Image: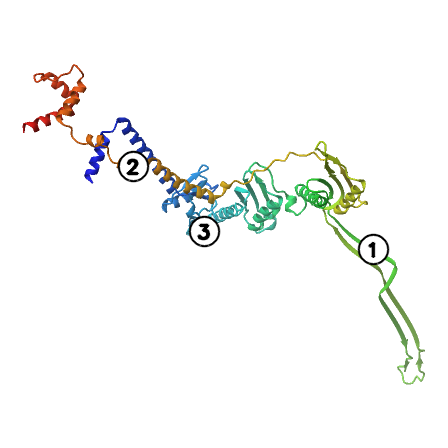
Amino acid sequence: MNQLFQQIKNIFKNLPVANRISFFVLLFLFLGAFGGIVFWGTTPDYELLYANLSPEDASAVISKLKDNKTPYKLENNGASIYVPSDKVYDIRMELATEGIPNGGGVGFEIFDKNSFGLTDFVQKVNYQRSLQGELKRTILKLDAVSDVRVHLAIPQESLFIENSSPPKASVVLKLKPGHTLSKKQVMGIVNLVAGSVERLKPENVTVIDSKGNILSSKEDSLGGIGSNIQIEYKQSVESILEKRIQTMLEKVVGKDNVISRVSADIDFNQIELTEEKYDPDSVVVRSEELNEERNVSTPITGNGAEQSQSFTQVQNATESTNTNEVKNYEINKTISHQVIPSGNIKSLSVAVLINGTYKKSDESGKSEYIPRTEEEMKKFTDIVKTAVGYTEERGDKVEVVNIPFEADEVTETEPTGFFDNDMVEILIKYLSILLSIVIIYFLILKPVIGWITRPLSKEELAMTYPITVSEAEKRIEGSTGENAQIGSGSRQKALELARNNPELAGQIIKGWLNKES
């Protein structure tokens, strides 16, 4: 082994300077490429763990990752945390068991601590803080919400009803870019907050966005149809009718050959009617009362105080009768209570454009427009009227027009690339590593190994052995030039040559010593 290293050392020593530099450059490039490939191959693929974290939650997550010695990366100013893809779900489960992240703010976990010695006022403040925090965490579950603040104004309860004031709440939403909330979602937030606080009514909950725009209104909370909901309802009715027309006619004239627009006049007034009707021709005895009174007096015979009187007093008998009859009549009455809901269609205005047909000309090769016949247009008009529920009494208008459409330039959509697949990216990564190793082996490593292990020629093999004295003297003569001749008495010339070529001088001295010995 030592002989092999000595042979390699001698070969490398006899190489020209340019070859030595090339060898070191190639060795440096090989080590650098190999190290880069190893680093790239061993670097784990990072995947998003959490995004849009508050500073408090991000700090808690990072602290836990450091305790577990888990590598991580921060992006988006520390709001997004990335961890190795094979550990994402395990880390999420582990953090979830510890309540991390908690969505910012304080929740009901504040009562997990020992509250001995706290006053009733502090307990109420902690309850309000925890309730606000829990509502914040719940609202943050919405996809369109990136951040939220909840403020509760809960007054102290009073023994007297007239002195008590209702609780109120305010919610400030920060929406994600490109996201909006519908009225139903806003009302869902309002009802969520109202249902979480005792005695809080929906009309006392105000929802605004981060720009100060009011998203909720009292009309919406009270169940009425506010202006925004009216617009949404009107648009939904028009969209449904337009879709009916579009789907029916496109089956006949083809896709993209029909344009339909509907304008609906909606009655948003809610009417309640109570009506009482009496029928004078229908008389019914409701009750009847008959009272008859009869008085009869009988003869009365009496004796005087004195027995000596022999006459008898006699009264004649009398009889009287009194009759009273009362009848109550009821007239037939009908009471009807009718509630006419809001949102009824008052009138419709419908406009439909239908494209004609095209026929290619044999001479010019251009398409020639052919309009629809009157019979076809009449059928299309009847179809549209039936689809939208046309009513002439309410003043509906339907216009169906045949007109040529402008041909739009067809833009071809690029198909989804093959390299957009995650599995393909992983496959490309490891194939690139394998290909780089093969290229380095065949272009760098194998030529170097072959160059080192190739058999030496006679000239190269002779260079590895020490030169003789005669050869050294010839080289000295050649290096000194034509005017440099070595003489036995020329001591100064020998010293000069020894300084210029010490290696050859050493070989000569060794040869002289060997000859003398």
Quarter holding the C terminus is: top left
Q: What is the CA distance from the residue labelled 1 to the residue labelled 2?
A: 118 Å
Instruction: State whether residue 104 appears in this view.
Output: no
Q: How many marks?
A: 3
Of residues 307 and 87, the one nearer the viewer is: 87
The three-letter code of the residue at mark 3 reads: Phe
Q: Earlier in the sequence, mark 2 or mark 3?
A: 3
Amino acid under label 1?
A: Lys
Q: Nearer the viewer, mark 2 or mark 3?
A: 2
Using the image, tell me which numbered label, if any, was put on residue 147.
none
- Tell me, for residue 111, which label it has, or none: 3
Of the numbered discs 1 and 3, the one sitting upstream in the chain is 3
Classed neighbour count for the residue bearing mark 2: other residues with Cα under 10 Å, few (<14), some (14–19), many (≥20): few
Quarter of the picture holding the N terminus: top left
Name the residue rendered at 26%, 26% in the picture: 17
**Dot 1 crowding, Cα within 10 Å, few <14, some 14–19, many 20+:** few
Q: Is 15 placed left or right of 276 in the picture?
A: left
Task: Report how far apart the C-alphas of labels 2 and 3 lie in the structure.
Answer: 76 Å
Residue named by callout 1: 277
**Marker disc for residue 450:** 2
Q: Quadrant of residue 508?
A: top left
SS for dot 2: helix
Residue 82 at x, y percent in the picture = 43, 42
Tell me the SS state at disc 3: helix
From where the camera sits, is residue 280 visible? yes
